[in-house]
Each structure stands twice: as structure tokens, then as C-alpha cells.
Image (cartoon, rainbow, N blue to C red):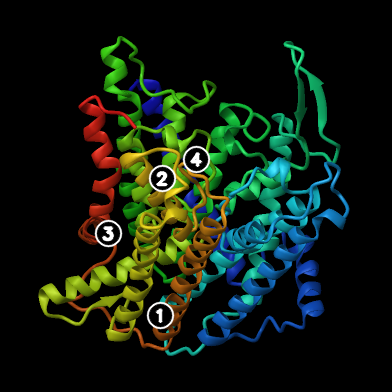
Amino acid sequence: MTFNGWLQIAFFAAIVTLLVKPLGLYMTRVFSGERTFLSPVLGPVERATYWLCGVDERREQRWVVYAVAMLLFSLAGFLTLYLLMRLQAVLPFNPAGQPAVEEGLAFNTAMSFDTNTNWQSYVPETTMSYLVQMAGLTVHNFVSAATGIALGVALIRGFARRSADCIGNFWVDLTRCTLYILLPISIMVGLFFVWQGVPQNLGAYTETTTLEGARQVIAQGPVASQEVIKMMGTNGGGFFNANSAHPFENPNPLTNFVQMVLIFSLGAGLTNVFGRMVGDERQGWAVYAVMGLLFLGGVVTAYWAEAAGNPVLAQLGLAGGNMEGKEVRFGIPASALFATVTTDASCGAVNAMHDSLTPLGGLVPLFNMQLGEIIIGGVGAGLYGMLLFAIISVFVAGLMVGRTPEYLGKKIEAREVKMAMLAILILPLSILGFTAIATAVDAGLAGPANQGPHGFSEILYAYTSGTANNGSAFAGISANTMFYNTTIGLAMFIGRFLMIVPMVAIAGSLAAKKIVPASAGTFPTHGGLFVGLVVGVILIVGGLTYFPALALGPLVEHLSMNAGTLF
């Protein structure tokens, strides 16, 4: 570990924190329907969109209608992307002549991008045409991110409103998020990436001859336009198989830093939106503090583990930390930071191979995802996941003092607690259930490239990543099989939609409640005690749920490595 490495981590944390208030203010104005500096340009586009789609922006929806609109929109997106991949051989913008995508892989990929997971069981540059990349994958990067943000805002409205029967209009939230937030930032930062050397063209692949005389095909394409929303929308799907380790996607340390900031920016800003909309910014800062403490714990552990390296190599005089699977232009600090950031959020982009991390270095991304991607988290998804834990925390606090729990003046009753627990418990059911099946059947055991605890970690990571809608992988697993394409596709569906529906039900229930005035017995939810309580509940729930599985994987591997046994 070096001073320079810690400085990079501290500078990143400072920049993200400085962006919280301005982004929160802007997004609050957007979702409140207030005028912004982009309104003169985008206002007519917004109104034209509503007219073409038959949407009345003044008409709000009950939680059931809001949820059904979201589900139908997601279903339409899934079917459209599936058909694009199945028909890509006969569609234009396919200079490499890519054939139709096989049924199982098309199902997995369509579900992946529809759920904001972007798990990729294929090599993008040899599988997907330019049309599928642009009209299919990139479009889903926008709308799946906008869907998550819209749902997060709907839950915020549930806390902020009183005696209301509506939580907003899904179509309006989706349109405003895409037009006023995602598109403008994507255009500006996309031009920055082009300036830094990221390709943006529709040209054919370039054939070259290497110095050794071998023939090499260099893939190109509209990369920069996909790169920004891939990060900002916490999507993570790469234009190239090497993802953000590829020099065309991530040319230098500056682009690497900007990509990490993009991953955290909107999720962090939404905590301020929460504080502003409920009328007390301190509430948003408390939520951000919980996320920040968990982030710091993860990045310190990951950096320490990767800087320490493999003791077996150290005994041979090969010290210097673990550089296996990492790019020299980023080094250990930026690689450990990126691995932590991308799994704190449901991004899944990688600038180093997670399969090559040390056992404890690999445990951090695993545990980040298993907590439900609540540490900043996916855009929108991270906030509503954290607020579910806040509901459980105030319920626990109420049990300890014998008082009806309240959060932001809303009484938390049996309905909210049941829905919150249902949303939280659906994740371990999918992660541990599918992992157990995969380790018991031949089709599952055929996937890992390694034996022992590391092979188990590869399986556990795959279903954790799918269920948490992250999309990164321990790349040693061969997941492009009918078994893994189907089961991971189902895991992505469960992790996205079976968590969302109970959450939207909570939003509707809270919106209908009256706000109870604070009294001397009200538990303050903006101070250090509340922050510590939420952190404790999250760690206890995560520890009790996943410790046995983690003990069989990365923890056993770490002990074995120290004893001189490698896998």
C-alpha cells in the first residue's frame, strides 16, 4: 500500500461527495416538474413525446398502475431486444457479418440488459452487430437505468406525501429522467471520451499484420456513445470482451477515474433528492453516510488484500502485490478501487479480472453484491434497497424500546415490514438456491475452470452477480451454456422484478399514511446513532445469511493460500 494509492481513493471519495448536492438539486427539480436550464430546448421534445404516446403528464398513478406500467414496458423491451438479436443476420449495420444469436444466449442477454444487469456470456465484438449494440443494448442502457431511477423517486414520494393515493406517473418519470438527466450527460462525457481516444465510428473492423507477421483483426465501432451510459446508468456491459480493461473503452488513468465517478454520481445524488423531497436534507446525508461507511470498509479491505498479494510468491522473493489480471496503466490502487465501486453499484464493468483477485480481494465484490447493491447501488435501485433496510432498522429500534416504529413521520406497521422483508429475502433465496443447484448437477459443475473453493466461488459469484443485477463475473466460469444462460437469466429476473413489486407496494402504503408529528420519544433518523444502527442491521443480516457460503469459498481459499495451497 502506498500514499499515492490512498490519495487516489480519498480524491475519488471527495469528488463524489462534492457532486451530491448539485446533482441532487437538479434531479429534484426535474422530477418535481420544475423549470431547468435545459427546459427551453428539451421542453418541446418532452411535450411531443407525451403527445405521440398519448400520455397525460398531469395524471398520476396508484402504485398498482405504476408497477404494471413498469412491468409491461420491461416486457416490451425484453421482446424487442430478443428479436433484434435473433434477426441481426438480416438487418443492416452488420459489417462483420455476425450471424443470428442462439436462442439461449439471446434470452440471457435480453433479460440481462432489460434488468440493468448486463451480464455477458459472449464476446461482444464477435457476436453483436452495430445495430444490436446501438438500437438494442445502448437503448436498454438508457431505459433500464431510467426505470430504476423512476422507481426510486416513486418510493421517495411515498415517504414525502401524506394521505395520497398516487405516487407519480411512470411514463413521465421515465421520459424526464432520460431527456433531462441521462442524455445530456451522455453527450457531453461521450465527446470527452472521443477526445481521450475512445472510438466512435461505423467502420468495418481493421485487419493488420503484427510485428511477428500474424494477422490481427481490430474491432471498432460506436464505442464512446455506449461507454458513458454504461457507467452512469450502472449497466456495465462492455462493447469489447475485456470491458473497461480494453484500451479502446478505457484508454488512460483519467478516463478510468471519470468512469468510476460516473458509476457513483447519480446514485449518490439520489440520496440528496431523498432529503430534499422529504423536507430535511439531513435525512439524505444520513443515508449517504451509511453508504459511505460501507464503501470505505470494502475499499480498504480490497486494497489491503491486493497490495499484500500472494504470500507464496512473497516467500519466493516476488513481492510487490497482486498484479495478475490487472492493467499496468491502472495499477493495484485504481484496480482495487474500481472493483469495489463497480460492485457497490450494480454496474459490473471491470478494469481488471476479478477471477484473479486474491481470496479476500474477491470476497469484497461478492459481499458488496450480496448485500443487495445498496452501497450507492444501481441508479434508483441502491436508494430503494437502502431505504428498505432503514425500514427494518427503525422496526428493530421500535422493538427495543417498545414503541411503534416511525420513519420520517410515517408509522411503520406490519404491512411495510412484511413487504420490506419479502424484498430483502428474495435475494438470498435466488443466490443460494441457484448456487446449491449448480454445485449438485453435472451441467453446473462443468462451468468452473478451477477446482476447490475457488471453483465454488466462481459459481457463487455468477448467481450473486445475476441476482444483484450487477453483471460482473469471476471470468473463469464458462457460462455460455443452456444451463447457465437459463438459470442466470431467471436469477436476473428474480433479483430485479420480485424485489421491485413489494417495494412499490410499500411506496403506495406510505403515501396513503398521515404524517405523525415528532415527539420526545421519536427516534431521530438523521444522526450518528441511526447511521450506526442501519450499518449494524445490514452487516448482521448479510453476515448471518451469507457467511456459510463465503466460508466455503473465499475464506477457505484465503486460509489455504496462507498454508501454501493454491487452486
Location of residue 408 (image quadrant):
bottom left
Locate residue 10, reporting x and y percent: 39, 34
Q: CA distance from mark 2 to mark 1?
A: 35 Å
Tell me the crowding category of disc 2: few under 14, some 14 to 19, or many 20 or more residues within 10 angstroms, Cα based.
many
Q: Nearer the viewer, mark 4 or mark 1?
A: 4
Q: CA distance from mark 4 to mark 1?
A: 37 Å
Say which amino acid is labelled 4: Ala
Q: Is residue 435 visible?
A: yes
Q: CA distance from mark 3 to mark 1?
A: 19 Å
Q: Which residue is located at x 43 percent, y 76 percent? A: 160
Q: Which residue is located at x 30 percent, y 37 percent? A: 360
Q: Which residue is located at x 68 percent, y 44 percent? A: 124
Q: Which mark is residue 458?
A: 2
Q: Nearer the viewer, mark 2 or mark 1?
A: 2
Q: CA distance from mark 4 to mark 3?
A: 28 Å
Say which amino acid is labelled 3: Ile
Q: Is residue 296 visible?
A: no
Q: CA distance from mark 2 to mark 4?
A: 8 Å
N-term-proximal mark, 2 vs 1: 2
Q: Which mark is residue 506?
A: 1
Q: Which mark is residue 538?
A: 3
Q: Nearer the viewer, mark 2 or mark 3?
A: 2
Locate residue 15, reporting x and y percent: 48, 40
Say which amino acid is labelled 2: Glu
N-term-proximal mark, 4 vs 3: 4
Q: Which residue is located at x 49 percent, y 35 percent? A: 353
Quarter of the image for the C terminus: give it. top left
Residues at circles 4 and 3 in contact by the CB criterion of under 8 Å = no
Q: Which mark is residue 475?
A: 4
Farthest left residue in view = 401
N-term-proximal mark, 4 vs 1: 4
